[in-house]
Image (spheres, rainbow, N blue to C red):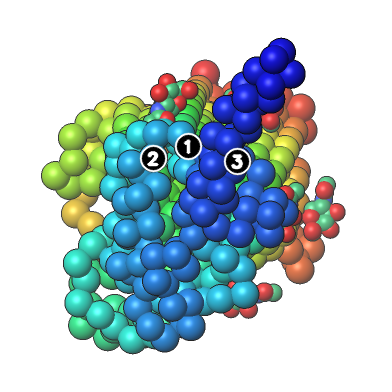
Amino acid sequence: MRVAAAGRTSLFLVLPMLLLLVVSATVRPAAAAATKVWKGEGTRYSVMAFHAAGDGETGDTKAFEETWDSACRDSGGANVYVPAGRTFLLRDATFNGPCKSPITMQVDGDIVAPSTLWQLKSSSVLTFHEVDNLTVDGCGQIDGRGAPWWDCYNHKKCSARPMLVSFSFCNGLRVTNVRLKDSALKHISVYRCSQALVHNVSISAPCDSPNTDGITIGASDHVRVSSSSIQSGDDCVSIITETTDVNITDIACGPGHGISVGSLGGAGEGPAMVERITVSNCKFFNTTSGVRIKSWQGGQGKANGFIFRDLNMTEVQHPIDIDQFYCPQGNCPERQGGVAITDARFINIHGTSSEREAIKIMCSESVPCHGIYLDNVDLSWCKHTAPPQAKVMNAHGSVAGMVKPQVRFLGR
Ligand SMILES: *[C@@H]1O[C@H](CO)[C@@H](O)[C@H](O)[C@H]1NC(C)=O
Ligand SMILES: *[C@@H]1O[C@H](CO)[C@@H](O)[C@H](O)[C@H]1NC(C)=O
Ligand SMILES: *[C@@H]1O[C@H](CO)[C@@H](O)[C@H](O)[C@H]1NC(C)=O
Ligand SMILES: *[C@@H]1O[C@H](CO)[C@@H](O)[C@H](O)[C@H]1NC(C)=O
Ligand SMILES: *[C@@H]1O[C@H](CO)[C@@H](O)[C@H](O)[C@H]1NC(C)=O
């Protein structure tokens, strides 16, 4: 009697459990094979289950968006899986939140944009909008195939071009391990996000590709960019207005235009605001600037609280560059006022410049720079025996340790 009861009880328990196992095995396709790549919690949604072709020729945007929508409705954590060994063709792919739980997009396969121009419906090849706790991870490559767009732009025939991957209005973003190349425009855009991490990514585009910034961060706070390598035709990382608390560390940058704050205070923009930016342990090779703060004449607002430290410059045109007269096309009209640049520290900066003016600190008469501090800066002019120079205008600041080339401030 007792035995039978126990047997019935265990059967009652075992049967539903078996059913559960069967159900979960069907919901999670190839769960056993996935253990190597899928370590997280929750359900795996492979784009293949949503009829992606992955042949590099058939458009897979719809399949990706449908996979996303299912994952986004899952309240138990979800993994959007892009399998290795395949190439997926995407354009204007839009992944909207808010989602029910954190999502990981595991990009182990490759993604390509079309090889020819297309009529843009979205600002980016992949757009993530209002997604919290998103992780984009994987060893796949995302190729923007931007060459026809660069050509079109250079011939003044295209005004709009797509970015490669953009994230907007998000909290808790992580982008790790992916490789991006040849975007038509910026590679990664982080806009109105809080708590974002970009780690161990590699980005590459030719040094003459127009406006192909590596990572642009705007209207965001608490952003960390670390252990990444960026080669591009524009800034490796750019930080634009309404951004605070950014930490950039262990980046290899070049070729490209360096790591830049700005440009700030452009016509038609409200008062600029950028604060608490740290750039440390970075290497620059063959870039036009090393670390730079650039603003337009006549702008308003402030850029305050910068630490640039432990930087290695190799053949950089202007390793240290503050420019309140930013004017990339030349012949800008003279304007009064400007974005106030204060408290910028340059500490332990070594290496070579490719131009004689290794240090440029060019501030306006109406809004001089304040609190510029140089400590232990040692730059030489590459391939020249003559020493490099510092060009300094309307700047208040101080120096400590050895500073080469010598810098003269207006006073503290
Ligand atoms: C994201 O993470 C935060 C902090 O852990 C949590 O409060 C929030 O509910 C999460 N949101 C989603 C959609 O996962
Ligand atoms: C960094 O990313 C590369 C390329 O995806 C990968 O091979 C490597 O293992 C990653 N490194 C770490 C420390 O995770
Ligand atoms: C930035 O990150 C580096 C490396 O982890 C760390 O040493 C430094 O304290 C951080 N700085 C800020 C301002 O968070
Ligand atoms: C440096 O960059 C320029 C373009 O900015 C390029 O033409 C040149 O080949 C690069 N030099 C090296 C040594 O990579
Ligand atoms: C700076 O980088 C160059 C080129 O990679 C390297 O040869 C040099 O040793 C580095 N200097 C320091 C101080 O790390």
Q: Are marks 3 and 1 in contact (CB under 8 Å)?
A: no
Disc with the residue nearer the chain's start (2 vs 3): 3
Quick one: SS at disc 1?
A: loop
**For the residues carrying marks 2 and 3, which lies nearer the camera in this image?**
3
Disc 2: residue Cβ within 8 A of ligand 1's nearest atom: no
Residue named by callout 1: 77
Q: 319 or 199, which lies in front?
A: 199
Alpha carbon distance from label 2 to label 1 = 6 Å
Alpha carbon distance from label 3 to label 1 = 23 Å
Q: Are marks 2 and 1 in contact (CB under 8 Å)?
A: yes
Numbered disc total = 3
Q: Is residue 75 visible?
A: yes
Question: Which amino acid type is shown beneath numbered disc 3?
Answer: Leu
Disc 3: residue Cβ within 8 A of ligand 1's nearest atom: no
Question: Which amino acid type is shown beneath numbered disc 2?
Answer: Asp
Question: Which amino acid type is shown beneath numbered disc 1?
Answer: Gly
Q: At 58% from the left edge and 36% from the top edge, which residue is drawn?
A: 15
Residue named by callout 3: 18
Quick one: SS at disc 2?
A: loop
Q: 85 or 153, which lies in front?
A: 85
| 43, above or below 286, in the image | above
Q: At 68% from the left edge and 54% from the top edge, which residue is drawn?
A: 32
Residue farthest along the front direction in this orientation: 1
Left or right: where 402 falls relative to 264: right
Disc with the residue nearer the chain's start (3 vs 1): 3
Residue 209, quarter of picture: bottom left
Q: At 62% from the left edge and 75% from the top edge, which residue is drawn?
A: 85
Quick one: SS at disc 3?
A: helix
Residue named by callout 2: 74
Q: At 54% from the left edge and 42% from the top edge, which residue is drawn?
A: 19
Could you tell me residue 292's position as x and y percent?
50, 46
